[in-house]
């Protein structure tokens, strides 16, 4: 063994770092030179806009307190939200002990503030802003996140304590969302492309002013307000078409044989959400979402479908439809129901409680309807499917749907952002909750081709393989154990739709005995009575 060197007092500890005098001098010069730059950068960084932050938090609490499904206090919301500071910078911690809220950065206590009363909204708002300001002053991560990031972190942590659908949307994406819902900047409803020679119309939105003017796909667009589109990109010409609502825009359109001038009045154009085609004497209507004009679009296609004197049925394809505006789903159901309850919403806020009843007449004259759903069908789309199924107005084909049975209301915040807050539960016409459970189809297509073929054969003989499961879902009442929901959904696992769905729909519409048998799986309509919570 090599003999150990004599101890100098440093064995087992780090030796002190000894730098040459020249190195120390260089480091001091670097620090000296950097100090003004660091100070200048710190001075250039904007301060936290405490007045806007306070306005947003106060508006949020005002909106949240009476509307959430479960009752919470200002203290709950603010302490949950302040955990967002730790999400931005883990060195920051917020604790509430012995009537005092404390903000610490590592081992350093930055601020201690006495608890306001639990229901003191102004007091808790002021406390939250004071802690945010203290964190801003100490944490570079908080300053890098900015005021917007600070609010986003606050609301993300707050809503982590609630349901999966409540959320805060920052100003920029909130503007985009509003434009999607309402149509955004005014235009003509034209989608443009180009070939080697000129700008082409590639789509015409049925909700826009170009549709009634008779513009069609394939026409060429030669000029906009006298400005030639030659050598321009579709994106550039599309911008030319935008303007103030109601303003005029003049288009030169046509083909190689003839051209004509058309003047349109710009309008906000919601996205087109309904598409249809005829398959023999069956009309397939695909609804991709529920926006401001969905029911109107659907009524136009139903009206056209009625022109076929030999119409045998309709297929409503809701696969992949993630929902949208609840009222549009109710109005869509009214187009094919003579009367009855379409959906019930129930929450703490009196304005969240509605029994959405419809009457007025079935546009289709009672032709058979098959509704296609899959594991992505959600929210307003589930409401439409459940309404038609519970009233025995349609047979539902596909798999168990997503099960989003909570309704959000939207609050506009002072910064231009939006709060989406769940404020009511959705109950189908027969009183069962959509949340978690989803819509169980009468014909299940997610268990394979062989199983589907057997179901159709049994339906032809008057036997409904899914009867017990469908009726069990209709018997469910809120509150319901998650384990029970999972057991029911096993009968027809959620899946992405396939061509088998359309094949099953055609079989049902071609064979009235199968269709009638599938309808019989739904129990007779009962009387809805709200359940006590």
Image (cartoon, rainbow, N blue to C red):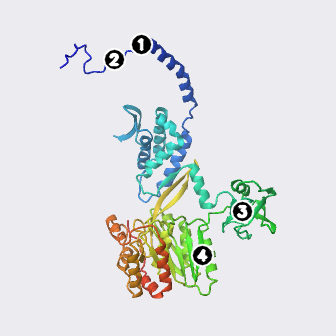
Residue ranking furthest to the left: 1
When asked about the image quadrant of residue 271, the answer is bottom right
Observer able to see residue 418? yes
Q: Which mark is residue 16?
A: 2
Q: Earlier in the sequence, mark 2 or mark 4?
A: 2
The crowding category of the residue bearing disc 1, from other C-alpha atoms within 10 Å (few below 14, some 14 to 19, many at least 20), is few
The one of 39 and 13 positioned closer to us in this rendering: 13
Q: Earlier in the sequence, mark 4 or mark 3?
A: 3
Q: Which mark is residue 20?
A: 1
Real-space Cα separation, disc 4 to disc 1, in angstroms: 84 Å
Q: Which mark is residue 277?
A: 4
Looking at the figure, which quarter contains the C terminus?
A: bottom left
Do the numbered discs 4 and 1 sit on residues whose CB atoms are within 8 Å? no
- Which residue is at a point 41% across and 58% down the rendered structure image? 70
Real-space Cα separation, disc 2 to disc 4, in angstroms: 82 Å
Observer able to see residue 99? no
Q: Position of residue 349 (x, y in %)?
A: 47, 62
Real-space Cα separation, disc 2 to disc 1, in angstroms: 13 Å
Q: Position of residue 184 (x, y in %)?
A: 64, 58
Q: Position of residue 468 (x, y in %)?
A: 35, 78
Real-space Cα separation, disc 3 to disc 1, in angstroms: 75 Å
Q: Is residue 266 left or right of residue 327?
A: right
User: Which residue position holds label 3?
Assistant: 200
- Considering only vertical position in the picture, is 523 above or below 115? below
The one of 131 and 287 positioned closer to us in this rendering: 287
Do the numbered discs 2 and 1 sit on residues whose CB atoms are within 8 Å? no
- Which residue is at a point 57% across and 26% down the rendered structure image? 40
């Amino acid at each position: 063994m090599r003999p150990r060197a004599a101890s100098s007092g440093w064995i087992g500890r780090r030796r002190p770092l000894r730098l040459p005098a020249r190195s120390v001098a260089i480091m001091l010069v670097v620090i000296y030179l950097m100090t003004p730059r660091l100070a200048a950068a710190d001075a250039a960084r904007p301060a936290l806009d405490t007045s806007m932050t306070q306005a947003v938090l106060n508006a949020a609490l005002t909106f949240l307190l009476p509307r959430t499904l479960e009752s919470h206090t200002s203290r709950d919301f603010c302490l949950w939200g302040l955990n967002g500071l730790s999400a931005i910078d883990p060195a920051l911690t917020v604790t509430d002990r012995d009537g005092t809220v404390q903000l610490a950065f590592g081992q350093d206590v930055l601020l201690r503030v006495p608890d306001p009363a639990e229901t003191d909204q102004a007091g808790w708002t002021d406390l939250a802003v004071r802690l945010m300001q203290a964190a801003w002053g100490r944490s570079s991560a908080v300053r890098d996140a900015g005021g917007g990031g600070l609010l986003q972190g606050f609301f993300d942590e707050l809503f982590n304590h609630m349901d999966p659908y409540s959320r805060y949307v920052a100003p920029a994406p909130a503007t985009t969302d509003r434009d999607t819902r309402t149509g955004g900047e005014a235009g003509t409803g034209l989608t443009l492309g180009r070939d080697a020679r000129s700008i082409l119309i590639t789509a015409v939105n049925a909700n826009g002013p170009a549709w009634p003017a008779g513009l069609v796909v394939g026409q060429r667009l030669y000029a906009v307000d006298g400005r030639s589109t030659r050598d321009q990109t579709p994106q550039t010409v599309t911008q030319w078409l935008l303007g103030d609502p109601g303003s005029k825009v003049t288009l030169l359109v046509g083909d190689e044989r003839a051209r004509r001038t058309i003047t349109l009045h710009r309008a906000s154009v919601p996205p087109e959400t309904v598409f249809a085609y005829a398959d023999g004497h069956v009309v397939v209507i695909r609804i991709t979402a529920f926006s401001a004009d969905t029911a109107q679009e659907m009524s136009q296609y139903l009206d056209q479908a009625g022109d076929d004197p030999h119409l045998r049925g309709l297929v409503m394809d809701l696969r992949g439809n993630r929902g949208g505006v609840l009222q549009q789903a109710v109005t869509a159901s009214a187009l094919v129901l003579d009367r009855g309850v379409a959906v019930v919403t129930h929450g703490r806020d009196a304005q969240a409680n509605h029994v959405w009843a419809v009457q007025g007449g079935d546009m289709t004259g009672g032709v058979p309807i098959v509704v296609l759903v899959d594991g992505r069908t959600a929210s307003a789309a589930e409401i439409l499917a459940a309404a038609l199924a519970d009233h025995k107005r349609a047979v539902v084909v596909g798999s168990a749907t997503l099960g989003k049975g909570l309704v959000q209301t939207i609050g506009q915040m002072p910064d231009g952002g939006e709060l989406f807050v769940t404020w009511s539960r959705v109950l189908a016409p027969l009183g069962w909750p959509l949340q978690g459970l989803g819509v169980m189809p009468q014909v299940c297509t997610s268990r394979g081709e062989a199983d589907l073929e057997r179901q159709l054969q049994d339906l032809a003989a008057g036997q409904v393989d899914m009867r017990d499961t469908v009726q069990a879902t209709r018997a469910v009442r809120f509150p319901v154990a998650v384990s029970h929901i999972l057991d029911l959904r096993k009968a027809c696992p959620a899946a992405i739709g396939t061509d088998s769905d359309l094949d099953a729909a055609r079989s049902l519409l071609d064979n009235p005995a199968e269709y009638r048998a599938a309808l019989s799986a739904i129990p007779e309509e009962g009387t809805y009575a709200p359940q006590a919570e």
